[in-house]
Image (cartoon, grey):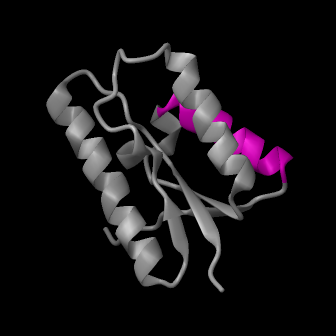
């Protein structure tokens, strides 16, 4: 049986177009995880374009609950650009989750 893997990385950006780039990056990572035999939780897709529907802290609280239930966290290559991803990374370490870092060919 595969692992449940939570994807962490930037969602927000200056423009809607840049947000869509971030969502697409996470989507591609989710596909790779599913193809590997594991199960992806992709918050970028779960709440895509929900901006403004709830206070920002609601999204992070929900993401942390998904992460708490996951086996591992997958850090997208640009995760350090995201304050939320930094928090998710710290929680993953605190909770003893396996941490997987995205490595893409140059």
**Which image quarter: residue 91?**
top right
Residue at image position (33%, 58%) is 27
Above/below status of 33 relative to 92 = below
> Any magenta on residue 48?
no
Horizontal side of 1 relative to 30 (left or right) equals right
> Any magenta on residue 94?
yes
Query: Taking the image as drawn, is residue 86 in sight?
Result: no
Residue at image position (63%, 47%) is 66
Residue at image position (30%, 46%) is 23
Horizontal side of 101 relative to 64 (left or right) equals left
Quadrant that contains the C terminus = bottom left
Give 101 or 50, whichever is nearer the viewer. 50
Q: Position of residue 57 (x, y in %)?
A: 57, 19
Secondary structure mainly formed by the magenta segment: helix
Q: Position of residue 59 (x, y in %)?
A: 52, 28
Above/below status of 8 relative to 3 = above
Q: Looking at this rendering, what residue extends furthest in the front direction?
A: 53
Q: Position of residue 102 (x, y in %)?
A: 48, 63
Give 16 or 105, whichever is nearer the viewer. 16
Residue at image position (60%, 35%) is 62
Above/below status of 98 relative to 57 = below
Q: Position of residue 20 (x, y in %)?
A: 21, 40
Give 99 or 7, whichever is nearer the viewer. 7
Quadrant that contains the N terminus = bottom right
Above/below status of 2 relative to 85 = below
Give 91 or 101, whichever is nearer the viewer. 91
Q: Which residues are magenta?
A: 82-95
Query: Taking the image as drawn, is residue 31 in sight?
Result: yes
Total residue callouts: 0
Horizontal side of 93 relative to 37 (left or right) equals right
């Amino acid at each position: 049986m595969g692992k449940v893997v939570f994807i962490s990385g930037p969602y927000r950006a200056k423009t809607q177009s840049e947000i869509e780039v971030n969502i697409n990056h996470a989507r591609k990572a989710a596909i790779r995880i599913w193809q590997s035999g594991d199960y992806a939780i992709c918050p970028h897709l779960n709440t895509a374009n929900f901006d403004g529907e709830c206070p920002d802290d609601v999204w992070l609280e929900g993401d942390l609950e998904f992460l708490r239930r996951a086996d591992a966290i997958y850090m997208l290559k640009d995760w350090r650009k995201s304050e939320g991803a930094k928090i998710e990374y710290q929680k993953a370490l605190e909770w003893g989750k396996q941490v997987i870092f995205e490595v893409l060919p140059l």
